[in-house]
Amino acid sequence: MTSETTETTPDEPVATETVEKKTAYETEKLRELIGARVVLWDFDGPICRLFARHRAERVAAGLVEWLAGRGLHGLLSEDERDTLDPQVVLRAVDRRHPGSELVAELEERLTQDELLAAASALPTAYADPLIRTWTAVGSRLAITTDNSPHVVRAYLAGRGLTGCFAPHIYGRTADVRRLKPDPHCLDRALDALDAPPGSALMIGGAATDVVAAERAGVRFLGYAGGERTAERLRAAGADTVLTSLQPLLTALRRPTG
């Protein structure tokens, strides 16, 4: 036992040094990212937990039941019928009937469910002060999301955050094929803000956000509410992933120089 203790003791300073170097690197990386003049925010995840109380799986099941009630149960595969994500149902129907009235009606039903969810959504910790601080230091902010823009506006109004983003809210349109990973909403935001992609940063919480940012030529910062989401973001190619927005807010508030 004594020899084992002797062998492991010298490693402790090395381990501490490694952690310190990693922390210093991450801090420097955040300082680089907060210098972005334009910040594109995904909505559900980085800003709030939209389906915290009005559960997403219930919404997805409701859409599936609505399709079944119209005699369209067989339109979805078994996996699609069992999904916990309402966006999966919408995308699946659009693949079979692109741009149809059925898709438009389904999208409207999803929007109404999202509006109900927005009334009880939980703000992501540190998101509100981070948004206000970033606005105060002169960065321009936009929302780039697969959720309905009506839902985003309703949530932001309830939090007193509309002025930090309006009119730059770019959400789901009638053309479901342009949902992420298509960079359509990011490109719309960049065009409206007259911002080159290199000046922008996207904060996103899904693998499709990583791909959309890459296609748009925008830097990416991942936000994950848990380690499983963080792993999915890293697997999709995200270099920097935070499980809390606090370090970002701290870096933004800390004077440079």
Image (cartoon, helix red, strand yellow):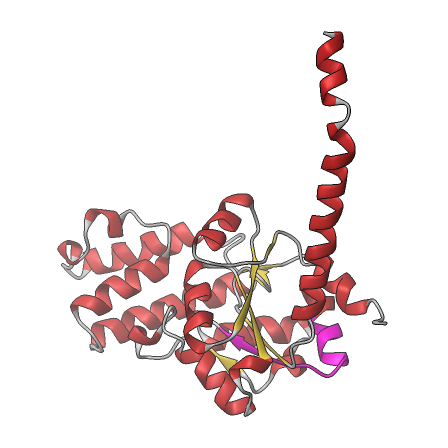
Q: Residue at x 32, y 52 (%)?
A: 61
Where does residue 120 sit, x and y in percent of width and height? 57, 59
Q: Is residue 13 left or right of residue 75?
A: right
In which quadrant of the rendered image does the N terminus lie? top right
Who is closer to the viewer here, 112 or 100? 100
Q: Quadrant of residue 140?
A: bottom right
Q: Quadrant of residue 59?
A: bottom left
Kindly tell me whether residue 246 is visible in this rendering.
no
Q: Quadrant of residue 88?
A: bottom left
Numbered range of the magenta stretch = 131-144
Where does residue 161 sit, x and y in percent of width and height? 67, 76
Furthest toward the top, the residue is 1
For residue 118, above or below residue 65? below
Q: Is residue 164 magenta?
A: no
Q: Is residue 137 magenta?
A: yes
For residue 56, above or below residue 18? below
Q: Residue at x 47, y 78 (%)?
A: 186
In which quadrant of the rendered image does the C terminus lie? bottom right
Q: How many marks?
A: 0
Kindly tell me whether residue 53 is visible in this rendering.
yes
Where does residue 100 sit, x and y in percent of width and height? 20, 77
Q: Residue at x 13, y 54 (%)?
A: 74
